[in-house]
Amino acid sequence: MAKILITSGPTRQYLDPVRYLTNGSSGVMGSALAQAALQAGHQVVMVSGPVRVRYPSGVKLLEVETTQEMLEACLAEFPNCDGLIGAAAPCDYQPAAVAAQKLKKTGEPLLLKLIETPDIVATLGKKKRLNQWTVGFALESEDARFQAIGKLQRKLCDLVVVNGVGAINSPHNEIEILNPAGEVVLAASGTKQKLAKQIIRVLDEQLLGPRSKTASATPSARPRKPQARI
Protein backbone atom coordinates (compact mmCIF):
# COMPACT_ATOMS: atom_id res chain seq x y z
CA MET A 1 0.00 0.00 0.00
CA ALA A 2 1.24 3.48 -0.86
CA LYS A 3 0.34 6.97 0.26
CA ILE A 4 -0.31 8.93 -2.93
CA LEU A 5 -0.51 12.69 -3.33
CA ILE A 6 -2.87 13.66 -6.17
CA THR A 7 -3.39 17.16 -7.54
CA SER A 8 -6.64 17.89 -9.33
CA GLY A 9 -8.68 20.61 -10.98
CA PRO A 10 -7.70 24.09 -12.17
CA THR A 11 -6.22 27.02 -10.31
CA ARG A 12 -7.18 30.70 -10.46
CA GLN A 13 -4.88 33.69 -10.88
CA TYR A 14 -6.64 36.95 -10.10
CA LEU A 15 -6.44 40.09 -12.27
CA ASP A 16 -8.43 42.17 -9.77
CA PRO A 17 -10.74 41.35 -6.84
CA VAL A 18 -13.36 39.71 -9.09
CA ARG A 19 -11.69 38.56 -12.33
CA TYR A 20 -9.21 35.75 -12.78
CA LEU A 21 -7.43 33.54 -15.31
CA THR A 22 -8.32 29.85 -15.21
CA ASN A 23 -9.13 26.87 -17.46
CA GLY A 24 -11.86 24.28 -17.95
CA SER A 25 -10.36 21.48 -15.85
CA SER A 26 -13.25 19.76 -14.06
CA GLY A 27 -11.43 17.53 -11.55
CA VAL A 28 -13.21 14.44 -12.91
CA MET A 29 -9.95 12.62 -13.67
CA GLY A 30 -8.50 13.55 -10.28
CA SER A 31 -11.59 12.21 -8.54
CA ALA A 32 -11.51 9.01 -10.61
CA LEU A 33 -7.83 8.50 -9.81
CA ALA A 34 -8.50 8.96 -6.11
CA GLN A 35 -11.32 6.41 -6.21
CA ALA A 36 -9.20 3.91 -8.16
CA ALA A 37 -6.27 4.36 -5.77
CA LEU A 38 -8.50 3.80 -2.74
CA GLN A 39 -9.99 0.68 -4.31
CA ALA A 40 -6.46 -0.62 -4.90
CA GLY A 41 -5.74 -0.24 -1.18
CA HIS A 42 -3.74 2.99 -1.26
CA GLN A 43 -4.09 6.11 0.87
CA VAL A 44 -4.79 9.38 -0.93
CA VAL A 45 -4.01 13.01 -0.14
CA MET A 46 -5.92 15.23 -2.59
CA VAL A 47 -4.88 18.82 -3.28
CA SER A 48 -7.60 20.37 -5.41
CA GLY A 49 -8.33 23.68 -7.04
CA PRO A 50 -11.93 24.97 -7.32
CA VAL A 51 -14.17 22.22 -8.77
CA ARG A 52 -17.77 21.08 -8.56
CA VAL A 53 -16.93 17.38 -8.62
CA ARG A 54 -17.07 15.47 -5.35
CA TYR A 55 -14.04 13.54 -4.18
CA PRO A 56 -14.27 10.15 -2.44
CA SER A 57 -14.87 10.37 1.29
CA GLY A 58 -11.74 8.35 2.04
CA VAL A 59 -9.27 11.00 0.86
CA LYS A 60 -7.57 13.71 2.86
CA LEU A 61 -8.77 16.77 0.95
CA LEU A 62 -6.90 20.08 0.85
CA GLU A 63 -8.67 22.81 -1.13
CA VAL A 64 -6.65 25.62 -2.70
CA GLU A 65 -7.25 28.37 -5.22
CA THR A 66 -4.00 29.65 -6.75
CA THR A 67 -1.03 27.80 -8.21
CA GLN A 68 1.18 29.06 -5.40
CA GLU A 69 -1.27 27.72 -2.82
CA MET A 70 -1.32 24.35 -4.58
CA LEU A 71 2.48 24.25 -4.58
CA GLU A 72 2.70 25.12 -0.88
CA ALA A 73 0.16 22.42 0.04
CA CYS A 74 2.06 19.85 -2.03
CA LEU A 75 5.41 20.82 -0.51
CA ALA A 76 3.92 20.28 2.95
CA GLU A 77 2.41 16.86 2.10
CA PHE A 78 4.89 15.34 -0.35
CA PRO A 79 7.60 14.41 2.21
CA ASN A 80 5.09 12.10 3.92
CA CYS A 81 3.90 10.48 0.67
CA ASP A 82 5.34 7.76 -1.55
CA GLY A 83 4.63 9.61 -4.75
CA LEU A 84 2.70 12.21 -6.72
CA ILE A 85 0.15 12.03 -9.52
CA GLY A 86 -0.01 15.54 -10.96
CA ALA A 87 -3.45 15.45 -12.59
CA ALA A 88 -4.24 19.12 -11.92
CA ALA A 89 -4.17 21.80 -14.61
CA PRO A 90 -2.69 24.75 -12.70
CA CYS A 91 -2.41 28.08 -14.49
CA ASP A 92 0.97 28.46 -16.14
CA TYR A 93 0.83 32.27 -15.97
CA GLN A 94 -0.28 34.92 -13.50
CA PRO A 95 -0.54 38.71 -13.74
CA ALA A 96 2.66 40.52 -12.82
CA ALA A 97 0.47 42.78 -10.66
CA VAL A 98 -3.05 42.34 -9.29
CA ALA A 99 -5.25 45.44 -9.37
CA ALA A 100 -6.50 46.48 -5.92
CA GLN A 101 -9.86 47.57 -7.36
CA LYS A 102 -12.09 46.20 -10.10
CA LEU A 103 -10.72 47.09 -13.53
CA LYS A 104 -13.01 49.51 -15.40
CA LYS A 105 -13.69 49.80 -19.11
CA THR A 106 -11.88 52.74 -20.68
CA GLY A 107 -12.64 52.24 -24.37
CA GLU A 108 -9.00 51.29 -24.94
CA PRO A 109 -7.30 47.88 -25.15
CA LEU A 110 -6.23 46.42 -21.84
CA LEU A 111 -2.67 45.15 -21.84
CA LEU A 112 -1.72 42.48 -19.31
CA LYS A 113 1.80 41.53 -18.34
CA LEU A 114 1.90 37.88 -17.37
CA ILE A 115 4.68 35.97 -15.64
CA GLU A 116 5.11 32.24 -15.19
CA THR A 117 3.76 30.49 -12.12
CA PRO A 118 5.91 27.90 -10.32
CA ASP A 119 5.93 24.41 -11.86
CA ILE A 120 4.51 22.08 -9.21
CA VAL A 121 5.49 18.72 -10.71
CA ALA A 122 9.01 19.89 -11.59
CA THR A 123 9.53 21.33 -8.11
CA LEU A 124 8.49 18.09 -6.44
CA GLY A 125 10.50 16.07 -8.95
CA LYS A 126 13.65 17.83 -7.79
CA LYS A 127 12.80 17.14 -4.14
CA LYS A 128 11.83 13.47 -4.35
CA ARG A 129 13.82 10.98 -2.31
CA LEU A 130 15.29 7.78 -3.77
CA ASN A 131 12.13 5.73 -3.38
CA GLN A 132 9.65 8.49 -4.19
CA TRP A 133 8.19 8.88 -7.66
CA THR A 134 6.24 11.43 -9.69
CA VAL A 135 3.71 10.92 -12.47
CA GLY A 136 2.90 13.92 -14.63
CA PHE A 137 0.08 14.69 -17.04
CA ALA A 138 0.73 16.33 -20.41
CA LEU A 139 -2.25 17.87 -22.18
CA GLU A 140 -1.11 18.85 -25.66
CA SER A 141 -2.75 20.25 -28.78
CA GLU A 142 0.02 19.18 -31.20
CA ASP A 143 3.02 16.82 -31.31
CA ALA A 144 1.63 15.29 -28.13
CA ARG A 145 4.11 12.46 -27.65
CA PHE A 146 7.15 14.61 -28.46
CA GLN A 147 6.00 17.39 -26.13
CA ALA A 148 5.18 14.89 -23.37
CA ILE A 149 8.62 13.27 -23.47
CA GLY A 150 10.19 16.71 -23.14
CA LYS A 151 8.01 17.43 -20.11
CA LEU A 152 8.83 14.06 -18.56
CA GLN A 153 12.55 14.78 -18.82
CA ARG A 154 12.40 18.41 -17.67
CA LYS A 155 10.15 17.64 -14.72
CA LEU A 156 12.05 14.47 -13.69
CA CYS A 157 8.92 12.32 -13.90
CA ASP A 158 8.91 8.54 -13.69
CA LEU A 159 5.89 8.30 -15.99
CA VAL A 160 3.83 10.79 -17.96
CA VAL A 161 0.17 10.49 -19.02
CA VAL A 162 -0.46 12.09 -22.40
CA ASN A 163 -3.88 13.37 -23.46
CA GLY A 164 -5.39 15.99 -25.75
CA VAL A 165 -7.55 19.08 -25.33
CA GLY A 166 -10.68 16.96 -25.78
CA ALA A 167 -10.12 15.72 -22.23
CA ILE A 168 -11.06 19.09 -20.75
CA ASN A 169 -14.41 19.00 -18.95
CA SER A 170 -15.27 15.69 -20.60
CA PRO A 171 -16.31 12.37 -19.03
CA HIS A 172 -14.14 10.53 -21.56
CA ASN A 173 -10.48 10.61 -22.49
CA GLU A 174 -7.85 8.98 -24.69
CA ILE A 175 -4.41 8.54 -23.17
CA GLU A 176 -0.93 7.15 -23.59
CA ILE A 177 1.44 6.51 -20.70
CA LEU A 178 5.13 6.96 -21.50
CA ASN A 179 8.14 5.83 -19.49
CA PRO A 180 11.49 7.69 -19.30
CA ALA A 181 12.74 5.77 -22.37
CA GLY A 182 9.86 7.25 -24.37
CA GLU A 183 8.13 3.89 -24.68
CA VAL A 184 4.33 3.60 -24.62
CA VAL A 185 3.48 1.32 -21.71
CA LEU A 186 -0.27 1.86 -22.06
CA ALA A 187 -2.57 3.24 -24.74
CA ALA A 188 -6.25 3.35 -23.84
CA SER A 189 -9.52 5.21 -24.30
CA GLY A 190 -12.82 5.27 -22.45
CA THR A 191 -14.42 6.89 -19.46
CA LYS A 192 -12.13 8.62 -17.02
CA GLN A 193 -13.17 6.14 -14.34
CA LYS A 194 -12.05 3.24 -16.54
CA LEU A 195 -8.80 4.97 -17.45
CA ALA A 196 -8.06 5.84 -13.83
CA LYS A 197 -8.09 2.14 -12.94
CA GLN A 198 -5.68 1.46 -15.81
CA ILE A 199 -3.37 4.26 -14.70
CA ILE A 200 -3.27 2.99 -11.12
CA ARG A 201 -2.59 -0.55 -12.39
CA VAL A 202 0.36 0.69 -14.47
CA LEU A 203 1.61 2.72 -11.51
CA ASP A 204 1.49 -0.39 -9.31
CA GLU A 205 3.39 -2.45 -11.90
CA GLN A 206 5.93 0.13 -13.04
CA LEU A 207 6.67 2.08 -9.86
CA LEU A 208 5.43 0.43 -6.68
CA GLY A 209 6.40 -3.12 -7.62
CA PRO A 210 10.06 -2.38 -8.46
CA ARG A 211 10.46 -0.15 -5.40
CA SER A 212 9.11 -2.78 -3.05
CA LYS A 213 11.73 -5.25 -4.32
CA THR A 214 14.79 -3.01 -4.28
CA ALA A 215 15.60 0.35 -2.79
CA SER A 216 18.10 1.08 -5.55
CA ALA A 217 15.65 1.00 -8.45
CA THR A 218 15.55 4.11 -10.64
CA PRO A 219 13.43 4.91 -13.72
CA SER A 220 16.38 4.28 -16.06
CA ALA A 221 17.32 1.03 -14.31
CA ARG A 222 13.91 -0.60 -14.39
CA PRO A 223 13.27 -3.35 -16.93
CA ARG A 224 11.30 -2.19 -19.91
CA LYS A 225 7.70 -3.33 -20.09
CA PRO A 226 6.01 -4.45 -23.31
CA GLN A 227 3.50 -2.08 -24.83
CA ALA A 228 -0.08 -2.76 -23.78
CA ARG A 229 -3.09 -1.59 -25.74
CA ILE A 230 -6.63 -1.63 -24.45
Image (cartoon, helix red, strand yellow):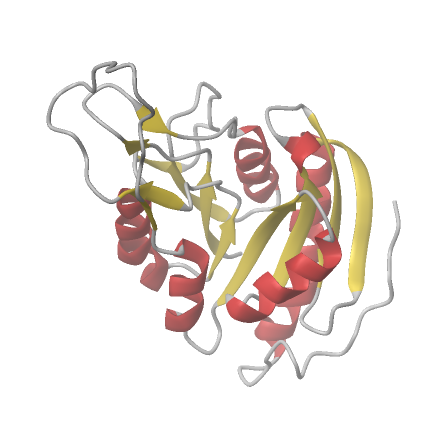
> What quarter of the picture does the C terminus occupy?
top right
The x, y position of residue 215, in whole percent, is: 53, 82
The x, y position of residue 33, in whole percent, is: 58, 39
The x, y position of residue 67, in whole percent, is: 33, 43
Q: Disc count in the image?
A: 0
Query: Which residue occupies 34% across, 55% down?
Result: 118
Q: Quadrant of residue 122?
A: bottom left
| 56 displayed left or right of 187 | left
- In the image, 55 versus 177, the foreground residue is 177
| 78 displayed left or right of 76 | right
Residue 204, visible in the rendered structure: no
| 229 displayed left or right of 143 | right
Q: Quadrant of residue 171?
A: top right
Q: Quadrant of residue 95?
A: top left
Query: Which residue occupies 41% across, 41% down?
Result: 91
Query: Which residue occupies 52% across, 49% down?
Result: 42
Query: Which residue occupies 45% across, 58% down?
Result: 121
Residue 73, visible in the rendered structure: yes
The x, y position of residue 145, in whole percent, is: 74, 57
- In the image, 64 versus 68, the foreground residue is 68
Q: Looking at the image, is 212 positioned above or below residue 104? A: below
Which residue in the rendered view is the most extreme toward the front?
A: 108
| 212 displayed left or right of 3 | right
Q: Looking at the image, is 206 positioned above or below residue 100? A: below
